[in-house]
Image (cartoon, grey):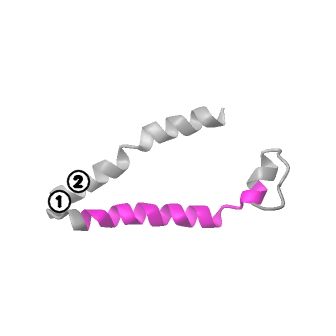
Amino acid sequence: AYFSLYEISERGTSWIGPLVFGMTVQLTGSSRTAMLPIITFFAFGVVVLLITDVRQAIAAAGNEVPALV
């Protein structure tokens, strides 16, 4: 079930980055400026990864938490 949800979310959102990039280029005329929203997406992803408690997620999934995560 997890992997099917993962595939659906990947396919369903893979168009957002190119759309935002293209719209920003159209609005500003600069591909350099269009990189700013993409960098923002990556920064948001890093923040989400940093605040995620991986040990708690492993335990919540009913798996044994390894010594080294």
Q: Number of marks in the image?
A: 2
* Residue labelled with disc 2: 23
Q: Residues within 10 Å of mark 2 (few under 14, many from 20)?
A: few
Q: Residue furthest front?
A: 68
**Would you call the spot at circle 1 few (<14 residues within 10 Å), some (14-19), or many (20 or more)?**
few
Task: Identify the secondary structure beneath mark 1.
Answer: helix
- Specify the quadrant of the image occupied by residue 21: bottom left
Residue 62: % across, % down = 83, 44
Which residue is pictured at 36% across the width and 48% down the height? 16
| Distance between the alpha carbons at the discs numbered 1 and 2 | 6 Å
Quadrant for residue 35, please give it: bottom left
Q: Nearer the viewer, residue 26 or 66?
A: 66
- Of 51 and 63, nearer the camera is 63
Task: Say left or right for 63 vs 12.
Answer: right
* Kind of residue at badge 1: Leu
* Amino acid at dot 2: Met
Do residues under tags 1 and 2 come within 8 Å of each other at their CB atoms?
yes
Assess whether residue 53 is covered by the magenta stretch. Answer: yes
Residue 57 magenta-drawn? no
Which x, y percent locates residue 43? 47, 67
First to last magenta residue range: 33-56
Residue drawn at x 81%, y 51% is 59
Residue 56's x, y, as percent? Answer: 77, 57
Tell me: residue 9, above or below residue 49.
above
Furthest residue in direction left, as rendered? 29
Identify the residue position indicated by label 1 in the image: 27
**Is 69 or 24 nearer to us in this picture?**
69
